[in-house]
Amino acid sequence: MADKEYIIGENQRSTVSEGPGIVSILTLNRLGLTKKAVDSILKNSRGDFRIVFLDNGSTDGTLEYLDELKLMYPSLVDVLKSDINLGVAKGRNKIFEYVLDKYGDNFKWVLSLDNDCTVHEGYDMALTNCINETGAWAVCPRLIQPDGKIFHDAHNGFLIDLNEMRLKLEYGGSVSMSYDDPKVSQRIETDVILGTSAKTPKFLKNVGFYDEGHKIGWEDFAIALKAFGLTGDSFSVWRDQDKHNGEDWVPLRKLADGNTSGVNVVYEPGCMITHDHPIVTEADEAYEKVRWDSEVIEESTDHFEKTWGVRPVL
């Protein structure tokens, strides 16, 4: 079936595929969380969807569960496997490659999840409607903490310190803001692409994949800057132009002042996802030690600074 065309602006058109939405999940042990994630997808999806897993070397029964899931839902589920932990960037890229090879352009979006994410009712239709109505190339959901607080307020974007050549994400008061606060309940453009986000075929083919120099840590910041239309020289050029007027932390959008070739990234509050990092068992603690290995994070931080000319900080 032919794609539908939607007129987004005078000079911009977006095509929306009639194919399925793809939910992608990285797994590394913590089988109980994977089951919760899958249950939420099966229960709360409303449109045509598929699930693609990439397992990073689980040893706790996850592989057996995924094999059983594939047998139960042969047309719905695909399982990719790695004997070693590929990390976030490379793991997600493997899924992107698989999806493009299998579906070409005939899918609506790929939603990237970790196995500690649960989706809320109608998350998939919210993503599709957002792309239809805005022409977004990437969509960020309303990401919710387990306690009902918002994970990130999309009104707050990147802040840049050109004096010290640093970058950070402005969280502001969002850490204590309820997920249903009116401020985070409106669809808006954003310069931030969270790890939990949906990307269209157009995004993957034109912006590209994650930088695999980041095994874990800052890979989402890097692809967001790329999508915003920046290069490795952008920040040093702005510094030399005194775009910051000597100020320490300046919003990225203010520095750019509309002069980028960035693509349309939209925050869609109708797509709600709960992101849980439980630290309650020895297995969870072991996972977090792998996830937040200080040496790996430092290597990723150094790689980001070498690539973009600014050092990411918390």
Image (cartoon, rainbow, N blue to C red):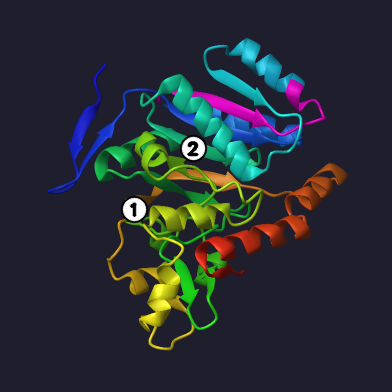
Distance between the alpha carbons at the discs numbered 1 and 2: 18 Å
Q: Dividing the picture into quarters, in which one does residue 157 lie?
A: bottom left
Instruction: Give the residue pinned by disc 2.
Output: 111
Up/down of 54 relative to 189, above or below: above
Image location (x, y in percent) of residue 130: 32, 42
| Residue 48 visible in rendering | no
The amino acid pointed to by label 1 is: Arg
Which residue does the image show at 53% across and 76% down from the upper left?
Answer: 165
Mark 1 or 2, nearer chain start: 2
Three-letter amino acid code at the position of disc 2: Leu
Q: Which residue is mark 1?
A: 187
Secondary structure beneath label 1 = loop
Query: Residue at horizontal 61%, vertical 70%?
Result: 313
Of residues 179 and 200, which is closer to you in this image? 200
Is 289 drawn above or below residue 259 in the view shown? above
- In terms of secondary structure, where does tag 2 sit? strand
Q: Is residue 9 above or below residue 245?
A: above
Residue 161 position, x and y percent, is 50, 78
Which residue lies at the image location 45% right of the left edge and 27% below the top edge? 100
Residue drawn at x 63%, y 15% is 70
Q: For the C terminus, which image quadrant?
A: bottom right
Q: Is residue 235 in view? A: yes
Percent of width and height locating residue 148: 57, 54
Extent of the magenta region = 47-63
Extreme right residue here? 282
Of badges 1 and 2, nearer the viewer stands: 2
The one nearer the camera, 305 or 41, is: 305
Does residue 55 show up magenta in the picture? yes
Q: Quadrant of the N terminus?
A: top left
Q: Which mark is residue 235?
A: none
Q: How many marks?
A: 2
